[in-house]
Image (tube, rainbow, N blue to C red):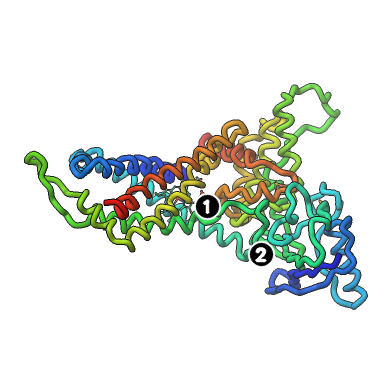
């Protein structure tokens, strides 16, 4: 199939940027969206035009590197998939596709469709871990974990840190990401010693990084390729309320 | 933000229900109004509570909106497909909120600080709010504006009433779907109830 692409190009964070039109010809519907972009870039190389920069790595929906807002939707029109898992059969021959970078003050554009998501690393460093003593690995069964809690924690831990939640949110709020990271540990016994410190530090870092406030529009949950639930945001609100009122 | 909004959310339902007495005739309605203004502790207590809630809600709403606009300096060129787009009501809370604020002020000027018609029932003199209401709602322009504002209030509530629960950390797969539906029905009942009054008066009285 043949497509018309309107792609945002921007030299660096300070450049104003703008849309440019490209043709994508002879695209197979079995290609992934990123493969389609590769084809377009190949043609640009032949014409000696700078390739369109975009982030990617695993190309199987586990690393969280691919980004892009496709026709106004982070990771494209489908729910529960990353851009690299999106197939071209989701589009029709002759379609015009608008492709933009993730937009948020805290995610400055590096180049074209590539944005700097290191603000997430700062949030993660502020508490998205547990501290353990080194030495022999403890017996896996030494701490009992309820099945239900383990499942809920696992569902939160499915977050790949892609940032689509921030991209999709009209407030660029990072509550879904941070909520998932807080919930993942709050639900497990191993997360208890640092439970209160974790939520306080992560939420405060999130605010310092310039992310907006949650107004419960739910856009993040719809955009999330791992279908992380809004329940995690409520859990974080609860955790934060408790921790901030009992803080000394 | 949420708690202050919840204060008004509860008030509007009571206010709507009380106003239904307009259909019970002039005397009942006027006596109801008179009973409220005669009970000073109740009147001043409620007024103080509502003013506090409104000031907090609006102030936080303004701060929140400014911060949120800053966090999203550039919007997307196209809107997402319906499967990935949030509801109209939740996307424009600040907009309909601001219109509601203007409405609250106009509403108070029209009724609370409006013309003081008097009426006497069994030797007791009181404001004839029934007459004022009928007069106000005979102006088509006023009715249209009123209807639009009440629909916007319905929108604001349809998101806000259930959103408070999420903001306060109450989300549970068993209860949240019910809370969301109940919030929507609540908004529908409040807005619908309020709407019935000017519309009925304009067309049938
Ligand atoms: C009768 C009047 C009003 C009622 C009943 C009401 C109710 C609510 C409720 C219950 C929420 C949800 C809060 C939460 O999720 O925590 C909300 C949110 C909001 N309201 Fe109002 N509100 C009213 C008037 C206003 C006014 C006058 C403004 C602005 C000038 C406003 C601006 C907002 C904004 C920006 C939000 C979004 C913030 C959020 O979702 O947390 N509201 N409102
Ligand atoms: S919560 Fe979902 S959308 Fe947000 S970073 Fe994690 S995986 Fe991506
Ligand atoms: S490239 Fe790894 S998730 Fe898409």
Give the residue displayed 27% in from the left and 58% down from the top.
Answer: B138
| Above or below, comparing residue B201 to residue A236 in the picture | below
Task: Please rate how many residues cluster around mark 2, counting C-alpha atoms within 10 Å: few if below 14, some from 14 to 19, many from 20.
Answer: some
| Above or below, comparing residue B56 to residue A23 in the picture | above
Instruction: Confirm whether circles 1 and 2 share one chain.
Output: yes
Camera-side residue of B164 and B152 = B152
According to the picture, the residue beneath numbered tag 1 turns out to be B89
Residue A71: x, y in percent? 71, 62
Q: Report the Cα–Cα distance between label 1 and label 2.
A: 19 Å
| Above or below, comparing residue B107 to residue B167 in the picture | below
Which corner quadrant of the image does residue A28 belong to?
bottom right
Say which quadrant the N terminus of chain A sits in: bottom right
Kindly tell me whether residue A179 is visible in this rendering: yes
| Above or below, comparing residue A21 to residue A174 in the picture | below
| Mark 2 C-beta to ligand 2 under 8 Å | no
According to the picture, the residue beneath numbered tag 2 turns out to be B78
Could you tell me which secondary element the residue under label 2 belongs to? loop
Residue A26: x, y in percent? 90, 66
Residue A119: x, y in percent? 69, 54
Earlier residue among tags 1 and 2: 2
Camera-side residue of A66 and B38 = B38
Task: Please rate how many residues cluster around mark 1, counting C-alpha atoms within 10 Å: few if below 14, some from 14 to 19, many from 20.
Answer: some
Could you tell me which secondary element the residue under label 1 belongs to? helix
| Mark 1 C-beta to ligand 1 under 8 Å | no
Q: Is residue B125 left or right of residue B137?
A: left
Numbered disc total: 2
Give the residue displayed 26% in from the left and 44% down from the top.
Answer: B22
Residue B115: x, y in percent? 18, 57
Which corner quadrant of the image does residue A137 belong to?
top right
Q: Is residue B93 left or right of residue B44?
A: right
Q: Is residue A214 left or right of residue A92?
A: left
| Badge 2: chain ID | B
């Amino acid at each position: 199939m043949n497509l018309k692409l309107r792609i945002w190009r921007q030299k660096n964070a300070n450049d104003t940027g703008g849309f440019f039109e490209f043709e994508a010809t002879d695209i197979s519907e079995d290609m992934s969206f990123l493969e389609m972009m590769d084809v377009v870039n190949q043609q640009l190389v032949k014409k000696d035009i700078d390739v369109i920069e975009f982030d990617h790595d695993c190309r199987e929906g586990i690393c969280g590197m691919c980004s892009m807002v496709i026709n106004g939707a982070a990771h494209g029109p489908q729910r529960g998939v990353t851009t690299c898992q999106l197939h071209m059969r989701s589009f029709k021959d002759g379609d015009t596709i608008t492709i933009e970078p993730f937009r948020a003050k805290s995610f400055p554009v590096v180049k074209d469709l590539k944005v700097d998501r290191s603000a997430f690393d700062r949030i993660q460093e502020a508490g998205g871990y547990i501290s353990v003593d080194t030495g022999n690995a403890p017996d896996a069964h030494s701490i009992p974990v309820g099945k239900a809690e383990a499942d809920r924690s696992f569902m939160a831990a499915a977050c790949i840190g892609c940032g689509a939640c921030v991209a999709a949110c009209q407030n660029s709020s990072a509550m879904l990401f941070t909520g998932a990271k807080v919930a993942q540990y709050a639900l497990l016994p191993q997360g208890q010693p640092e439970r209160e410190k974790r939520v306080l530090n992560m939420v405060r870092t999130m605010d310092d990084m310039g992310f907006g406030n949650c107004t419960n529009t739910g856009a993040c949950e719809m955009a999330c390729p791992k279908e992380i639930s809004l329940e995690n945001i409520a859990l974080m609100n609860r955790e934060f309320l408790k921790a901030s009122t009992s803080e000394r | 933000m949420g708690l202050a909004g919840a204060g008004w959310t509860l008030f509007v339902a009571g206010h709507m229900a009380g106003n239904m007495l307009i259909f019970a005739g002039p005397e009942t309605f006027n006596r109801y109004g008179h009973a409220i203004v005669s009970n000073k502790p109740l009147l001043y207590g409620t007024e103080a509570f509502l003013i506090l809630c409104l000031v907090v809600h609006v102030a936080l709403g303004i701060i929140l909106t400014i911060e949120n606009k800053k966090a999203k300096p550039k919007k997307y060129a196209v809107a997402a497909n319906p499967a990935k787009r949030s509801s109209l009501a939740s996307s424009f809370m600040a907009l309909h909120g601001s219109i509601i604020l203007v409405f609250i002020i106009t509403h108070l000027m029209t009724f609370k600080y409006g013309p003081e018609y008097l009426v006497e029932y069994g030797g007791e003199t009181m404001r004839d709010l029934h007459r004022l209401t009928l007069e106000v709602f005979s102006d088509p322009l006023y009715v249209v504006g009123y209807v639009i504002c009440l629909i916007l209030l319905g929108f604001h509530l349809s998101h806000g009433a259930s959103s408070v629960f999420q903001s306060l950390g109450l989300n549970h797969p068993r209860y949240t779907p019910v809370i969301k539906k109940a919030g929507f029905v609540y908004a529908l009942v409040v807005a619908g109830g309020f709407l019935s009054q000017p519309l009925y008066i304009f067309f049938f009285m």
